[in-house]
């Protein structure tokens, strides 16, 4: 009989993230499909009362928490200790958590303390013949596997964007606070804050409906024999502002920008999509001036509808990588798009 | 620019390029050094250390070369007695050999009258000629064309395998990703090599992270940089060529490695050599590896006069020839690549040794143009040099011209290599008179053991290729060519596709798996990449000459579409697409392209 | 820091990024077709970690860098032939599969053991580096477990910058959600840092560094012990290439105005 523990981090405002609520839904479904399974929610943060209320009706049998100032910010030592305490208290056989930066940092180590196996970046959790199976990606989204483990405890970190977040009513629930033993050594690391890259504005928006990818073509010589960097920058930023989309880039363009050539100063390595970049999740994606090479396109695995604008009818996007390829000058197209967007 | 502050390193033996020639050299030398009884040979250049042997390879890995390869492998087998062929990935014993004459199913190729007549005869009596899918197996094939008892190899896998053996001896080091810029020549002596500058812009000017290329000073420099290597060519420039020797015959070889479709059960080691298609001057091959893989490719020689000489397009037609397509249809492209071949053979032999240096491999004229083989021959030259070097080292004799002449060149002159290359010397001359004369010449030379040949003189580059208007005069009216020119110019495209289609070549129907655009072949097949921070290795010397160039052959022939139409008629070079085949420099009629060493290019280890 | 850091970089090898990958099932479970034939590179994020390590070591005299790699010996040797020219390090090689299909936990145990066995390693100066995720398993879990086994609880993942403060403490930037960095202050070693891209470009090839490295690398490779992974921890039910091909509609003949209209409509759908 499985005992499930769902670990959730509570943010500074006492809230749960969208990824957290998705994990709630996942845990709920899993508990339902495992006969006799029980499940508990384990909250970690400065204060967990609001968060517990937020998910009071999710169906979990128990709400545990490790709270206090020491647990306010995501930090390996404190998070791992909290996770360990919650897992031991709940005697969990399956430990679920969203694969966010907090739990990705802390849980694998905690798993080791618990003698647990760990799988991360899980795209789906299913039950077949009474056994838990997970689906995850290998080789940077190029190979997909369905797998399971017999050993317990088993830690499962679930990627965001694969399931609807739990959206039940808030309510009241009893919260069992575990005594928190704060070790002095944790203070060796202090979270100081959050820093956005040195750009004028935030252009990475994980929750946006659209990913807009700019490729190195924006900086290349155009048919008139010149490159048009200023206009490129303007067109891109204008579009990003107007649509509130998330901005991504190819590696080539990021590297041009970071080689100190001040090509498109608002692009950093954080914008890079692909094999050595990110693999964002958005319902739609529009690629411009980007060739659509494999190392880039593997980063599009989770973009559902894909369109591209490229001068080259034989570019990678034409080879089954986009739904629609417009063979056209992206400058001309985006000028017009921005005009239409008003 | 003032001479920058260069670092310097001393070694005993520096080797340029890691192909089969260097493989044969290093494995022989390293084993001798490692297996020696008694104390290790001491380094003269780095006192207190054992002998320092290093090899610098331009490509980013040891296994990124391109070749056929069907080889008799006599020298290779001698180096590895009792060789278990299955140890080398993709290798197989040659199991079946066919030499095929291919008819042209579209009637688009330029066949001389006699050939057209023969074709008609074959088509009229297909049974008599045992014509199968537009091909006849030559009933009688001369012995010299056979490679019985030999091996089918992947040069990439073979080189990697050899490289591992060399490294494991611990007696030599191989460094890929390390292009050699030039030899260091001091008072008529080669004193080592200089590596390329890093941290420079495309023009070679210092940029972020500038690191001037290091000088590697060596007692002996071994040049095994292949057919088009810039270090060998520099030596030719400085030291000249022996009387009567020249290098004016070339070909570019281009190949696909194809995963054959399920159900095609050709035996590994099956080998087809073909003539007659896609153009009579273009030879082709089809070799079967284990694991249902095949290498299929063509050679486009310098004596083929078409100025719109696109190897890629021809290769696409070649694989679709009905005789081959029945095996290849439904297959998947696994790899692709191209490389030059020095077709002058022994006549292109430079001075094989001088003070402080020796030359091995194809760049030393080892490739046999009659049998179309170069791998085993290159390997043999390396082995011979290694034996000579060990001799000299043991006797404590310096690497002077005299000593190397005696120990290395002497060995080479006494070897089977020399005899066979003499036989082959004039084999291809006939092609300069026409295709038929060429074939007759090859046959004659082969059968007579080199005593007979059809004479002919290679044309100098400037005379080699007629203008497009002239070459296509009998096929396309002038006005139409002008129109094609304008249309292609507007789209910044080369002319070859339009010209070929106008001559009756069918359009290529891409299937996304094997029939793919040239760009896709670069990515899916060759996995071509180029690092930043180095100078462009292809340079147009005098842009003015390009402006008035009538052919723009460089654009038409470029194996990677790396050279494309640029501003004012001066072609532009895009390093990210270059496969370092080296064919641009010998194709340009004005000798207006400088081809140097750079890193990057193919990243496929299966060619 | 007067006597420098002891930096151990954990880095596997992965197929060169443009290679075609195809899974096959063998006796030991899933693997890549022709895995031993595919050209390999040092795992990209771990390579960044190595460059950062070398940079840090150069600026802190007395430091030393080890590269610990669990990979098939023959392939690792090939990768060393390029990577050894980049920066000075000492190789600790473990002969075993570089496959993504091995268990992160098992790999971590093998790596930690190898680290513990490094002669003269000073834990009080120890920094364990690596890539925050491999390009093979893509788990981002191995380093944390290595750290746990070594008893290090100052751990950071997705690191883009490590700045040494005047008092010897660290200022560390980690990638977190939303394209921003979490900033932490850490008292100093020992610590575990899983690197993202970092800030340094790939160093040029330096032949003399290569020669020096290689002297110790070849013996390390020759003496590489089997990593002893038992395998079988994960049961694979299915391993496949997702159907990536879409039916691409290539639209060539529309004017920019018409295309713009279509795009805007599509965005607003
Ligand atoms: C180890 C490694 C890891 C890598 N990881 C990544 C990764 O994570 N992410 C990534 O992106 N890449 C990655 N790459 C690089 C990848 O292989 C490509 O080099 C890169 O994606 C190319 O970027 P691009 O398409 O923007 O540029 P280019 O290839 O230069 O393409 C520019 C495109 O713009 C088009 N264009 C030009 N002008 C116009 C115009 N006016 N209108 C419309 N189109 C125009 C051109 O037709 C061309 O297709 C990696 C490579 C390696 C070796
Ligand atoms: C398509 C094709 C098919 C062929 N088929 C066959 C066949 O079936 N049988 C056969 O026997 N032969 C065949 N050959 C010929 C054979 O490949 C060559 O003769 C052989 O590879 C020559 O070996 P090599 O060592 O002299 O030179 P290469 O193999 O050319 O090796 C030279 C090496 O030097 C490197 N290099 C060059 N310049 C520098 C520099 N400046 N610094 C550092 N490194 C440098 C190159 O990258 C290369 O790796 C074929 C060739 C081609 C292209
Ligand atoms: S490089 Fe040679 S072939 Fe090319 S345009 Fe210039 S002169 Fe003509
Ligand atoms: S530019 Fe590169 S690919 Fe093109 S012909 Fe020259 S060497 Fe070959």
Image: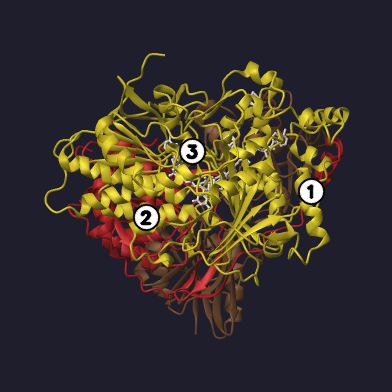
Residue B2 horizontal side relative to residue C179, left or right: left
Residue lying at 40% horizontally and 57% vertically, measured from the top left: B74
Q: Position of residue A95 (x, y in %)?
A: 47, 71
Residue lying at 48% horizontally and 47% vertically, measured from the top left: B374
Colour assigned to chain A in the rendering is brown
Quadrant for ligand 3? top right
Q: Position of residue B39 (x, y in %)?
A: 12, 49
Q: Nearer the viewer, mark 1 or mark 3?
A: 1
Label total for image: 3
Question: In whole angstroms, how far apart are the C-alphas of marks 3 and 2?
Answer: 30 Å
Mark 3 nearby-residue class (10 Å; few <14, some 14–19, many ≥20):
many
Residue, disc 1 = B116
Specify the label residue B227 is tagged with.
3
Residue, disc 2 = C76
Mark found first going from the N terminus, 1 or 3: 1
Colour assigned to chain C in the rendering is red
Query: Helix or strand or loop: what does disc 2 sit on?
Result: helix
Name the quadrant of the N terminus of chain B.
top left
């Amino acid at each position: 009989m499985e005992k499930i523990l769902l670990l959730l981090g509570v943010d500074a405002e006492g809230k749960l993230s969208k990824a957290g609520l998705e994990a709630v839904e996942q845990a709920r479904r899993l508990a339902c499909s495992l006969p006799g399974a029980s499940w508990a929610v384990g909250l970690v943060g400065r204060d967990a009362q609001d968060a517990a209320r937020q998910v009071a009706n999710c169906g979990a049998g128990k709400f545990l928490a490790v709270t206090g100032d020491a647990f306010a910010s995501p930090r390996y030592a404190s998070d791992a200790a909290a996770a360990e305490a919650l897992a031991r208290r709940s005697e969990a056989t399956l430990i679920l958590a969203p694969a966010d930066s907090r739990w990705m940092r802390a849980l694998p180590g905690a798993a080791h303390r618990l003698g647990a196996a760990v799988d991360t970046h899980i795209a789906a959790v299913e039950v077949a013949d009474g056994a838990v199976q997970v689906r995850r990606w290998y080789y940077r989204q190029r190979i997909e596997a369905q797998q399971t483990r017999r050993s317990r405890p088993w830690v499962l970190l679930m990627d965001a964007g694969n399931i609807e977040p739990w959206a039940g009513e808030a309510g009241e629930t009893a919260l069992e606070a575990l005594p928190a033993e704060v070790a002095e050594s944790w203070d060796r690391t202090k979270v100081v804050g959050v820093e956005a890259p040195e750009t004028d504005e935030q252009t990475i928006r994980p929750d946006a409906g659209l990913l807009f990818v700019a490729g190195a073509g924006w900086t290349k010589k155009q048919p008139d024999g010149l490159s048009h960097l200023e206009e490129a920058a303007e067109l891109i930023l204008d579009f990003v502002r107007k649509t509130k989309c998330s901005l991504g880039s190819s590696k080539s363009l990021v590297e041009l920008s970071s080689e100190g050539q001040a090509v498109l100063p608002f692009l950093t390595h954080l914008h890079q999509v692909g094999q050595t970049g990110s693999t964002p999740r958005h319902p739609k994606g529009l690629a411009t001036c980007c060739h659509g090479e494999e190392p880039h396109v593997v980063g599009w695995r989770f973009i559902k509808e894909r369109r591209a604008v490229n001068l080259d009818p034989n570019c990678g996007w034409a080879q089954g990588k986009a739904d629609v390829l417009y063979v056209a000058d992206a400058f001309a197209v985006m000028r017009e798009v921005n005009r239409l967007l008003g | 620019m003032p001479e920058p502050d260069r670092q310097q390193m001393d070694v005993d033996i520096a080797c340029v390029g890691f192909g089969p020639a260097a493989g044969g050299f290093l494995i022989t030398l390293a084993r001798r050094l490692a297996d020696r009884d008694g104390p290790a040979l001491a380094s003269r250049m780095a006192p207190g250390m054992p002998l320092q042997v290093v090899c610098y390879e331009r490509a980013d890995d040891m296994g990124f070369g391109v070749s056929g390869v069907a080889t008799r492998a006599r020298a290779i087998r001698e180096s590895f007695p009792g060789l278990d062929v299955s140890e080398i990935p993709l290798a197989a014993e040659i199991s079946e050999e066919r030499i095929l004459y291919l008819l042209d199913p579209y009637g688009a190729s330029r066949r001389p009258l006699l050939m057209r007549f023969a074709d008609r005869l074959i088509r009229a009596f297909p049974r008599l000629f045992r014509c199968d899918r537009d091909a006849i197996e030559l009933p009688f094939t001369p012995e010299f064309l056979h490679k019985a008892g030999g091996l089918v190899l992947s040069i990439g896998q073979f080189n990697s395998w050899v490289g591992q053996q060399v490294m494991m001896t611990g007696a030599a080091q191989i460094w890929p990703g390390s292009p050699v810029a030039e030899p260091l020549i001091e008072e008529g002596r080669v004193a080592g090599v200089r590596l390329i500058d890093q941290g420079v812009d495309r023009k070679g000017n210092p940029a972020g992270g500038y690191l001037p290329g290091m000088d590697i000073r060596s007692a002996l420099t071994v040049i095994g940089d292949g057919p088009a290597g810039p270090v060998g060519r520099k030596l030719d420039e400085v030291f000249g060529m022996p009387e009567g020797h020249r290098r004016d015959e070339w070909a570019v070889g281009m190949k696909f490695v194809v995963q054959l479709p399920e159900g095609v059960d050709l035996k590994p080691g099956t080998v087809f050599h073909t003539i007659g298609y896609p153009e009579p001057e273009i030879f082709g091959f089809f070799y079967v590896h284990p694991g249902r893989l095949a290498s299929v490719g063509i050679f486009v020689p310098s004596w083929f006069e078409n100025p719109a000489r696109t190897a890629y397009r021809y290769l696409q037609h070649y694989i679709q020839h009905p005789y081959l397509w029945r095996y290849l249809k439904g297959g998947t492209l696994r790899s692709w690549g191209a490389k030059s071949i020095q077709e002058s053979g022994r006549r292109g032999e430079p001075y094989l040794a001088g003070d402080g240096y020796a030359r091995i491999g194809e760049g030393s004229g080892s490739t046999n143009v009659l049998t179309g083989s170069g791998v085993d021959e290159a390997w043999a030259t390396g082995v011979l040099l290694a034996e000579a070097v060990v001799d000299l080292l043991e006797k404590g004799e310096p690497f002077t011209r005299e000593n190397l002449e005696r120990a290395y060149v002497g060995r080479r002159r006494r070897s089977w290599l020399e005899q066979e290359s003499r036989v082959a010397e004039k084999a291809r001359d006939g092609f300069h008179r026409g295709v038929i004369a060429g074939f007759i010449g090859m046959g004659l030379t082969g059968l007579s053991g080199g005593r007979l040949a059809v004479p002919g003189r290679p044309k100098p580059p400037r005379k080699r290729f007629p203008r497009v208007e002239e070459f296509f005069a009998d096929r396309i009216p002038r006005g139409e060519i002008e129109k094609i020119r304008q249309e292609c110019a507007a789209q910044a495209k080369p002319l070859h596709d339009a010209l070929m289609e106008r001559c009756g070549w069918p359009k290529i129907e891409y299937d996304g798996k094997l029939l793919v655009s040239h760009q896709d072949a670069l990515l899916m097949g060759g996995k071509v990449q180029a690092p930043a921070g180095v100078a462009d290795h292809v340079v147009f010397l005098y842009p003015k000459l390009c402006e008035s160039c009538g052919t723009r052959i460089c654009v038409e022939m470029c194996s990677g579409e790396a050279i494309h139409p640029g501003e004012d008629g001066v072609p532009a070079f895009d390093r990210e697409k270059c496969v370092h085949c080296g064919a641009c420099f010998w194709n340009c009629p004005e000798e207006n392209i400088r081809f140097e060493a750079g890193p990057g290019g193919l990243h496929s280890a299966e060619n | 820091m007067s006597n420098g850091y002891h930096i151990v970089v954990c880095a596997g090898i992965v197929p060169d990024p443009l290679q075609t990958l195809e899974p096959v099932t063998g006796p030991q479970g899933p693997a890549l077709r022709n895995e031993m034939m595919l050209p390999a590179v040092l795992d990209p994020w771990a390579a960044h970690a190595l460059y950062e390590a070398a940079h840090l070591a150069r600026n802190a005299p007395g430091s030393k860098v080890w590269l610990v790699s669990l990979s098939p010996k023959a392939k690792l040797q090939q990768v060393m032939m390029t990577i050894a020219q980049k920066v000075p390090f000492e190789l600790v090689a473990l002969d075993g599969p570089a496959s993504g299909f091995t268990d992160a936990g098992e790999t971590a145990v093998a790596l930690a053991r190898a680290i513990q066995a490094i002669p003269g390693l000073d834990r009080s100066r120890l920094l364990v580096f690596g890539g925050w995720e491999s390009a093979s398993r893509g788990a981002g879990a191995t380093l944390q477990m290595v750290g746990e086994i070594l008893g290090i609880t100052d751990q950071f993942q997705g690191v883009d910058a490590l700045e040494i403060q005047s008092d010897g403490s660290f200022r560390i930037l980690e990638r977190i959600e939303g394209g921003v960095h979490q900033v932490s202050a850490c008292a100093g070693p020992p610590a575990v840092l899983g690197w993202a891209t970092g800030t340094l470009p790939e160093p040029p090839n330096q032949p003399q560094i290569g020669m020096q490295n290689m002297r110790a690398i070849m013996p390390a490779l020759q003496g590489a012990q089997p990593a002893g992974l038992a395998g079988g921890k994960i049961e694979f039910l299915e391993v496949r290439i997702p159907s990536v091909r879409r039916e691409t509609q290539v639209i060539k003949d529309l004017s920019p105005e018409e295309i713009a209209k279509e795009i805007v409509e599509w965005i607003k759908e």
